Image (cartoon, grey):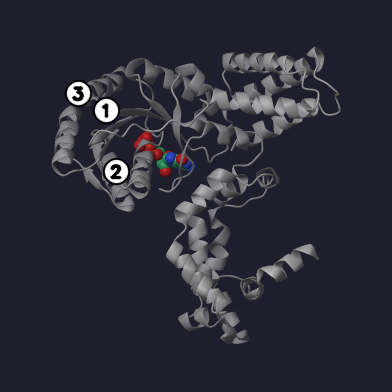
Amino acid sequence: MFENLSERLERSFKILKGEGKITEINVAETLKDVRRALLDADVNYKVAKQFTDTVKQKAMGMNVLTAIKPSQLMVKIVHDELTELMGGKAVELNLENRPAIILMSGLQGSGKTTFTGKLAKMLKDRQHKKPLLVACDVYRPAAIEQLKVVAETVGVDVYTEEGNKNVVEIAQNAIRKAKQESYTVVIVDTAGRLAVDEEMMNEISNLKQAINPDETLFVVDSMTGQDAVNTAKEFNDRLDFDGVVLTKLDGDTRGGAALSIRTVVTKPIKFVGTGEKMEAIDVFHPERMADRILGMGDVVSLVERAQQQFDEKQARELEKKIRKNKFDFNDFMAQIQQIKKMGNIKELAGMIPGVGKALKDVDIDDNAFKGIEAIINSMTPKERSNPDIINQSRKIRIAKGSGTKLEEVNRLLKQFDQTKKMMKMVSGMDKGKMAQMAAA
Ligand code: GDP
């Protein structure tokens, strides 16, 4: 995400390295570079100009702070201004009403239906809500089907009226049902078109008027750059939506939409989508995003993701096993599944300060564990719980069964052995010994 922009900004700050103080000249030179970097990231030109003007003003105003190096000062100011540009603070959904009604809007293919599922899952898992999804994309039977599949995947209910083309009626019926059956959130998925057109806008603005939602969200594909911003403007002019959902931030999107939308439509980005899976959703935090853009990582989000996937009971059992030296391939596999649930591996690595940039050209994806999983799946249950019995002929069989090479099986067994030894050492060690080791 935003790799190019991060790199370009870092290069811009280098202009100030070695400079003793901020001057009109070195600031102008740096900001010219920053502005070019923003424009190349597809940031709206007015937004980019306004941004560098503000940074310049602040930098010149802070010139008195001689204790701070100019390059550091510039990074700090740019960081703060990027945060501001994206809205300053995270803005939550207004879900006080029972049921709270959320209306989804956006073009076809923007990721509305996928996001409807992700949001339902998030509200159910983290806020113990009881969501009802409503299929108001009545023109494509496949769309209704897709919403049903999504609902089933995340384990929530869905309301459909096959054959009925009156979306206001469908939504009102769904809301009535939600009230009767104590659903706490109603999420209405609507039809999008490939481009903005009058009919679609009329339909959705009528729907909005009829059901008076607590939140109208505009979903947009961040890969579309400036188009995303223009579409946002058109939808906002008609719908006066409450917040933006930026999807597909996991792709190599340049950042223009994330950085320009807030200024152009003066509505906050509330969520981002970072993958096709139902877990790939994040609340949008401007400051954390600024951290990431400037290559500072995003440890807070990383820890949050880990906590959401962390199963305390399972962890305690695992610890017991480690103590008893009983960690086996079943546990190994379970751990891999937990990591995978946290999302795209490369994206996770990007949240660790310093690591994202180093991994820019490294090809790691969700398939990173495929070979390992195949090998473990080719083991018999006995071998998985008793890796010691895996002799040469078993190894050959496992390699064949998993479509891997014998060396790969050997490597995994060796790594497993080392991991186990290390775990035993760490769990058996008291604090004194650890301190000794750290001091050595
Ligand atoms: P809709 O027409 O607006 O309902 O869009 P869909 O929800 O059907 O999404 C269109 C395509 O984009 C699907 O193939 C989704 O899997 C994909 N998609 C949605 N959100 C994301 C995301 O955050 N990242 C990626 N990589 N793909 C996404």
Q: Is the CB–ligand 1 distance for label 2 below 8 Å?
A: no
Task: Looking at the image, tell me whether mark 2 or mark 1 is earlier in sequence order.
Answer: 2
Picture disc at residue 147? 2
Q: Amino acid at mark 3?
A: Ala
Q: Which residue is at a point 29% across and 43% down the rendered structure image?
A: 147
Q: Amino acid at mark 2?
A: Leu
Assess whether mark 2 and mark 3 are in contact (beta carbons under 8 angstroms). no
The number of numbered badges drawn on the structure is 3
Assess whether mark 1 and mark 2 are in contact (beta carbons under 8 angstroms). no
Q: Which residue is mark 3?
A: 210
Residue 338 is situated, as x and y percent measured from the top left of the image, at 49, 60
For mark 2, does the 10 Å Cα neighbourhood hold few (<14), some (14 to 19), or many (20 or more) residues? many
Quadrant in which residue 189 is drawn: top left
Q: Nearer the viewer, mark 3 or mark 2?
A: 3
Q: Secondary structure at mark 3?
A: helix
Task: Looking at the image, tell me whether mark 3 or mark 2 is earlier in sequence order.
Answer: 2
Q: Residue 12 vs residue 340: left or right? A: right
Picture disc at residue 213? 1
Q: Residue 163 vs residue 43: left or right? A: left
Residue 397 is situated, as x and y percent measured from the top left of the image, at 55, 81
Q: Secondary structure at mark 2?
A: helix
